[in-house]
C-alpha cells in the first residue's frame, strides 16, 4: 500500500508567517541596537573623548583613586551613587537626598544616605565597574544596553537604553552577617545599663535598656499596649516615628495579627512596665531580615541585614481580659 504524505497548506502558511515575523523582529532589534550605539558614540565623543572601553564594552572613568579593598562581583558594599539614562543624562535612581529632590523624584518613605547593596544584583555594567574600584574611590561607569537591561523595560529604564553611573565606594563590608554582628556589639558597648535577650528560635541576641524605670504594671504576653516611638539606624538615620498622640497599639505575643510589629518589639517590650522609657536594639533576624523593606515606589525604606534602634515610651498597658476564659475559676 502506498502512503501519500499530504502537506497541509494552512500549516505551511503559519510557518511562513512565523519565519517572516521572526525575521522582522530580528531586523527591528538590530536597527534599535545600531541607533542606540550611534547616540552612545556621539555622547562619548562629546563628553569623554579620551575614554577607552574595556573588552566588554564598559567605559570606566576613574575620578578619584581609592586606597582600600576591591570588591568582587558578589560583595556587599556601601556606596553613594547617581544613575542616569543616556544620551539625555536624566537621573533615574539615587539615594542621595538632595539629588532626588533636585530631580523631583524624592520618596518621603525611602531611606536616603549611604546605600547598602550586594554587587551583582543590578546589571553587568555596574557589576564589572564596581569590581574595578577600590574602597574610598570615585568613578563613572558608562555602557550600552548590552551590559544594561537590553531590550526589556526595567522600571524607569526603557528598552535599548544606555546608562551612566557616578559611584563613590564608601566601604566594602565583607561577610554581611559578621559585619552586622560586629556593628551591633560596637554600638551597644557605648550604652550604659544595656541588657541582652537571647531568642532561642532565631538563635540571636537583641538588646534593650530602660532609661526611665517606673512601678507601673508590667507588660506581659497578651497585654494590649500603646507605645510612642522613634525608629532609626545605628548611624542615626530616622526611618519612622509616632506622631503626637497617635500611639502604636498592639497585642504583645500576637505575631500574626494584622499590623503586628517586628519580632524584636514583642520580645523587648516584655521587659518594660507602663510609663517606662528606653531603647530596643534589634538585629536583622528579629527585624526585616535579609531583604529589608521597600516603599510603594520600590525604593528601600529599611536596608537588608540592618540593625534597628527604637526609642520607646510605654504609654499604657492593658493586661489580658480573663473574664470570659472558661478555665478561669469563679
Image: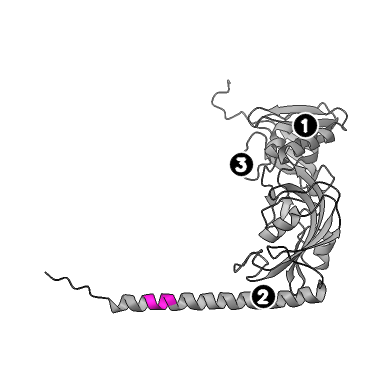
Q: CA distance from mark 2 to mark 1?
A: 54 Å
Instruction: Look at mark 2 in the image and give the residue it sits on.
Output: 36
Q: How many marks?
A: 3
Q: Which residues are magenta?
A: 15-19
Label 1 near label 2: C-beta < 8 Å?
A: no
Query: Residue 87: which quarter of the image?
Result: bottom right
Q: Quadrant of the N terminus?
A: bottom left
Q: Magenta segment, principal secondary structure?
A: helix
Magenta stretch: includes residue 17: yes
Which residue occupies 82% across, 73% down?
Answer: 47
- Location of residue 286 (image quadrant): top right
Q: Mark 2 or mark 1, which is nearer to you?
A: 2
Q: Residue at x 78, y 76 (%)?
A: 45
Mark 1 = which residue? 207
Pair 3/2: label in front: 2
In depth, the one of 254 and 54 nearer the eye is 54
Which quadrant: the C terminus? top right
Q: Look at the numbered disc 3 and give the secondary structure of its residue.
A: loop
Mark 1 neighbour class, 10 Å CA radius: few under 14, some 14 to 19, many 20 or more: many
Q: Secondary structure at mark 2?
A: helix
Q: Identify the residue under disc 3.
A: 257
Give the mark nearer the N terminus: 3 vs 2: 2
* Whether residue 128 is visible: yes
User: Which circle marks residue 173 in the picture?
Assistant: none
Q: CA distance from mark 3 to mark 2?
A: 51 Å
CA gap between label 3 and label 1 equals: 24 Å
Amino acid at each position: 500500500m502506498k502512503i501519500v504524505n499530504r502537506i497541509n497548506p494552512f500549516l505551511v502558511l503559519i510557518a511562513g508567517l512565523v519565519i517572516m515575523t521572526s525575521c522582522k523582529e530580528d531586523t527591528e532589534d538590530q536597527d534599535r541596537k545600531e541607533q542606540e550605539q550611534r547616540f552612545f558614540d556621539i555622547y562619548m565623543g562629546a563628553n569623554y573623548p579620551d575614554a577607552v572601553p574595556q573588552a566588554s564594552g564598559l567605559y570606566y572613568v576613574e575620578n578619584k583613586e581609592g586606597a582600600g579593598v576591591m570588591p568582587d562581583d558578589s560583595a556587599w558594599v556601601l556606596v553613594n551613587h547617581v544613575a542616569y539614562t543616556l544620551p539625555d543624562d536624566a537621573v533615574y535612581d539615587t539615594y542621595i537626598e538632595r539629588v532626588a529632590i533636585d530631580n523631583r523624584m524624592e520618596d518621603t518613605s525611602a531611606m536616603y544616605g549611604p546605600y547598602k547593596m550586594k554587587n551583582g544584583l543590578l546589571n553587568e555594567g555596574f557589576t564589572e565597574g564596581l569590581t574595578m574600584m577600590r574602597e574610598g574611590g570615585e568613578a563613572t561607569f558608562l555602557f550600552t544596553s548590552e551590559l544594561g537591561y537590553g531590550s526589556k523595560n526595567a522600571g524607569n529604564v526603557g528598552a535599548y537604553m544606555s546608562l551612566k553611573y557616578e559611584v563613590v565606594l564608601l566601604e566594602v563590608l565583607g561577610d554581611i552577617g559578621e559585619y552586622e554582628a560586629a556593628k551591633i556589639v560596637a554600638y551597644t558597648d557605648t550604652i550604659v545599663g544595656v541588657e541582652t535577650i537571647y531568642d532561642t528560635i532565631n538563635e540571636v541576641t537583641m538588646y534593650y535598656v530602660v532609661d526611665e524605670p517606673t512601678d507601673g504594671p508590667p507588660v506581659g504576653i497578651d497585654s494590649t499596649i500603646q507605645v510612642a516611638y522613634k525608629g532609626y539606624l545605628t548611624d542615626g538615620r530616622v526611618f519612622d516615628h509616632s506622631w503626637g498622640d497617635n500611639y502604636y497599639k498592639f497585642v504583645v505575643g500576637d505575631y500574626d495579627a494584622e499590623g503586628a510589629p517586628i519580632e524584636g518589639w514583642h520580645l523587648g517590650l516584655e521587659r518594660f512596665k507602663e510609663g517606662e522609657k528606653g531603647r530596643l536594639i534589634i538585629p536583622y533576624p528579629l527585624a526585616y531580615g535579609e531583604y529589608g523593606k521597600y516603599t510603594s515606589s520600590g525604593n528601600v525604606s529599611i536596608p537588608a541585614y540592618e540593625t534597628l534602634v527604637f526609642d520607646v515610651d510605654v504609654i499604657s498597658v492593658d493586661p489580658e481580659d480573663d473574664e470570659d476564659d472558661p478555665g478561669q475559676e469563679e
